[in-house]
Image (spheres, grey):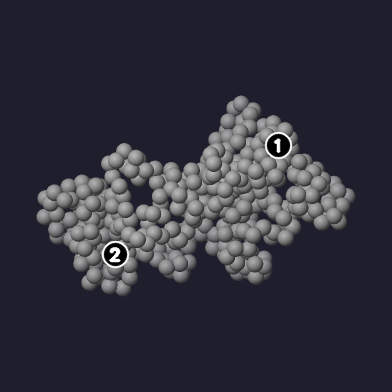
Amino acid sequence: MNGILEGIRVLDFGRWIAGPYCAHILASLGADVVRVERPKGEDDRYLMPVTRHGEGAQFLQCNDGKRSLSLRMTSPEGREVMRRMIAQADVVVANYSPSGLRHFGLDYDTLRAIRPDIILASASAYGTDGPMAERIGFDGVGQAVSGAIHLTGEPGQPFRAATAPIDFATALSLAYGTLAAIIGRMRTGEGAHVEGSLVGTSLNITNQILMEEATGFRHREPTGNRSPMSGPSDVFRARDGWFIMQVIGQKVFERWCRLIGREDLLEDPRFASDDLRGENGEELSRIMRDWAAGRSRDECIEILGGANIGCGPVLAPAEVVGGALDLRATFMRDVPFPGSDPVPIVPPPARLSRGGVEMSRPPLLGEHSDAVLASHGFGRGEIDRLRGAETV
């Protein structure tokens, strides 16, 4: 089965996560995605190295299924290569500030002058409007300025998330916006500029809390692992490990009370609603800690899961890749890589019954340069000259 986006050509000038992962999603749907980077490679290729060539885990995850072109983009010859490829592209993906896009000739006006119906998918830290538009930033900046870090951790000690949820959420948003733009072009023949930003994504995620603050209904402060919005919802220690349990909604609360033999809590006015259970959750967490202390982690999860209460073990990375809950077998594919052991890569989270593709492994630097140039109309002599000038 061919992918839904078969025939769509994507040039990926993205770096780090937001741009490259967006392009990776398009590749998973069948688009021909070419990652363009400098002849010595970009910094994000080598972050968190896991192969003997030095490729990093972040690069492998975000660039699965792409072809690689190494190109000196700032040279006159490199600019001409870009122009000729853009003229044949359907989508350009880039994550730079507005001035960065203009510097590389990847701003929407420049692209439209080359191909009027082009789609530009761009990601930045603060968006293209406002006084902070030219500032750079990574995932943690998005978490910080949206209020998320302030509310994470304990009072007096904020923590950021250990992973990069804002980067990946921005990439997902950029991908669905790009898909909408592709559909729009099919209907109207017109291209579009699809914009995403780390701060815009993070503000979306904290929007509910910001509404509470703005309307004066509630001023929230950090509560550690305990949810301030329902309860008992916390991370608990069993006899031999940790697990999370989340009781949300009246029916689930009733099941939990019956399970632990505390039906009296159903008559307690402090626990009459999710909001009240969140406000008074410290007491509920104490009751649950006492219940779990004498049981094993697996026993707790078996009992709670059997009662249809949301729960799960707190797993270390070694447990995840070691096969716990069959997560590796269910959600990952072990991808061979030249000169390295297979690496477990998790495909994009949305699965299609038809229209997705089995992707090739992530590319070596410049691995497909000759083939990519040839597929864009460059002759053998032109390619040899570009190589002789160290443009590719």
Mark 2 residue element: strand
Tell me if residue 110 can be seen.
Answer: yes
Q: Nearer the viewer, residue 48 or 336?
A: 48
Percent of width and height locating residue 114:
73, 35
Q: Residue at x 72, y 33 (%)?
A: 113
Taking 289 as reference, is 369 left or right? right
Mark number, residue 21: none
Q: Compared to 290, does 374 lie above or below?
A: above
Residue 353 in view in this figure: no
The residue identified by callout 2 is 236
Q: Nearer the viewer, residue 356 or 206?
A: 206
Q: What residue is shown at x 40% (from left), y 63% (from top)?
A: 325
Q: Which residue is drawn at 37% across and 57% down?
A: 152
CB contact under 8 Å: marks 1 and 2: no
**Residue found at x 68% / y 42%:** 102
On the image, the x and y values in percent for residue 131 come to 54, 41
Position of 34 with respect to 333 (left or right) is right
Name the residue type under label 2. Answer: Phe
Q: Which of marks 1 and 2 is in front?
A: 1
Q: For the residue carrying disc 1, how many other residues have a C-alpha within 10 Å: few (<14), some (14-19), or many (20+)? A: some
> Viewed as shown, does residue 47 lie left or right of 382?
left
Relative to 115, does residue 360 appear above or below in the rendering? below
CA gap, disc 1 and disc 2 = 55 Å
Work out whether residue 44 or residue 320 is closer to the camera in this orientation and state it.
44
> What residue occupies the far bottom of the structure in this picture?
240
Q: Which of 127 and 204 is in front in this view?
A: 127
Q: Which kind of residue does numbered mark 1 sit on?
A: Thr
**Residue 110 — which label?**
1
Query: In terms of sequence position, does the residue under pointer 1 or pointer 2 come before the other?
Result: 1
Number of residues whose C-alpha sits closer than 10 Å to that of mark 2, classed few (under 14), some (14–19) or many (20 or more): many
Q: Quadrant of the C terminus?
A: bottom right
What SS does tag 1 mark?
helix
